[in-house]
Amino acid sequence: MEYQEDSLIEGCKRKKRKARNKLYKLYANQFLGICLRYTRNTSEAEDVLHDAFIKIFTKIDQYTGKGSFEGWLKRIVVNTAIQSLRERSKTRLVFDENEIDDDRIREDIDVVLPMISAKELMEFIQQLPDGYKVVFNMFVIEDMSHQEIADKLNISVGTSKSQLFRAKKFLKVEVEKRIKELDNI
């Protein structure tokens, strides 16, 4: 696989259409899922995906072979999605500066997530306010620390924690509503 990956990367660096198409086909569905987590609908996600691949093809010469190629690609996709959120908001993302204790955050989400399908979770995540959504995705899905999130978004660690808490609280309420609806059927 590594030889094929090296060949694919080299083809993309030489701007070969077949190599670019193959790279797109290999990763488009996976990266569309990432984009959907940061956007409101499929159309926006497809736009972000398109922009991300343009950046990938433009910056592929910057990939040095150190570290995972897929990880390098994902960073571009996530960064493109975050940038899209900022542009869509017309200003900086708005974050609530109130700090919240981190101890309860993981416990709440671990209780409710097993009760719903991945599709339902995606629907709920897409309903989150942008500030909640971006922190939730970066912490829970991208597995970033609060310090990394704070550095990337230029916010405090406390703000990152509070946004995550509020996102999880929102998701918990929505999951509980869905469960009650199903119980009444």
Image: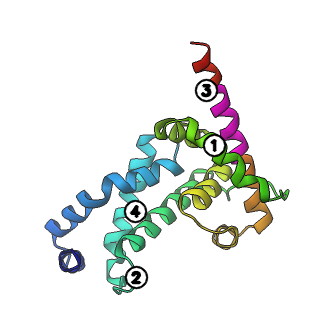
Q: Is residue 80 above or below residue 171?
A: below
Q: Alpha-carbon distance for marks 3 and 4?
A: 34 Å
Q: Alpha-carbon distance for marks 2 and 1?
A: 32 Å
| Label 4: how many Cα within 10 Å (few below 14, some 14–19, many 20+) | many
Residue 70 falls left or right of residue 167: left
Local SS, label 3: helix
Q: Which residue in the protein does label 1 denote?
A: 128
Q: Is residue 120 above or below residue 184?
A: below
Closer to us: mark 4 or mark 1? 1
Mark closest to the chain's N terminus, 4 or 2: 4
Mark closest to the chain's N terminus, 3 or 2: 2
Q: Residue furthest right?
A: 98
Q: Which residue in the protein does label 2 denote?
A: 67
Residue type at the position of mark 4: Ala
Magenta run includes residue 175: yes
Q: Which residue in the protein does label 3 denote?
A: 178
Q: Is residue 94 visible?
A: no
Residue drawn where x is 55% and y is 60% of the image: 82
Mark closest to the chain's N terminus, 3 or 4: 4
Mark closest to the chain's N terminus, 4 or 1: 4
The C terminus sits in image quarter: top right
Residue type at the position of mark 3: Arg
Q: Alpha-carbon distance for marks 4 and 2?
A: 19 Å
Residue type at the position of mark 2: Gly
Q: Position of residue 62 (x, y in %)?
A: 37, 83
